Amino acid sequence: MATAATSSLESEFPYSLTISLPLPTHRLASSALRALQVDAELSPFVRRSFALTTPTPAAEDGTTQQVEGIEEEKKTFLQTTYRATTNRMLRVAVNGFMESLGVVLGVMGELDIDVLKEELGK
């Protein structure tokens, strides 16, 4: 059930996009979240939220289910939700986010031990 605050946010910011990025470990997902959330959205016409999640199992009807009580270490997906007043503002905000995400992932790929282990294991 949607609350009044949620309904107000949806009507004020009707355009939305959720990006779920799988990462090899919880530590990497948490590091990416901390690196990306320090930069505030510059536009008052855009809202952004972050969460660490797990891959949600698909239900029989093809929808995804929310699983409660998941161990923190299993949360390896960085989920970013954008809401904007116009589709153009959403596109501009997401483009900026993708550039920042590319930098964060590039640094992880070059410097992080867990990422290097993943690549060597292949």
Image: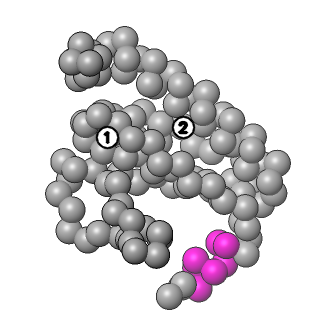
What residue is shown at x 21% (from left), y 62% (from top)? Answer: 70
Q: Is residue 122 above or below residue 41?
A: above
Q: Position of residue 41 (x, y in %)?
A: 63, 45
Per the image, the residue denoted by label 2 is 39
Question: Which residue is pictured at 34% across the width and 63% down the height?
Answer: 57
Is residue 112 at all visible to an observer of this figure?
A: no
> Compared with residue 50, is residue 12 higher up or lower down, i.e. above or below?
below
As rendered, which of 92 and 68 lies closer to the eye?
A: 68
Q: Amino acid at mark 2?
A: Asp
In-front residue for pair 103/56: 56
Bin the neighbour count of mark 2 within 10 Å (Cα to Cα): few under 14, some 14-19, many 20 and up.
few
Circle 2 SS class: loop
Where does residue 43 sit, x and y in percent of width and height?
Answer: 72, 47
Q: Residue furthest front?
A: 60
Start and end of the magenta stretch? 4-10
Of callouts 2 and 1, which one flags the residue occurring earlier in the amino acid sequence? 1
- Indicate left or right for 116 with 94 as reference: left
From the top left corner, tell me how far across and down residue 94 is, in percent. 66, 42
- Residue at 51% across / 21% down in the picture? 103
Estimate the x, y position of residue 92 in percent, counting from the top left: 75, 40
Image side of residue 85 versus residue 73, left or right: right
Name the image quarter holding residue 83.
Answer: bottom right
Q: Which residue is mark 1?
A: 30
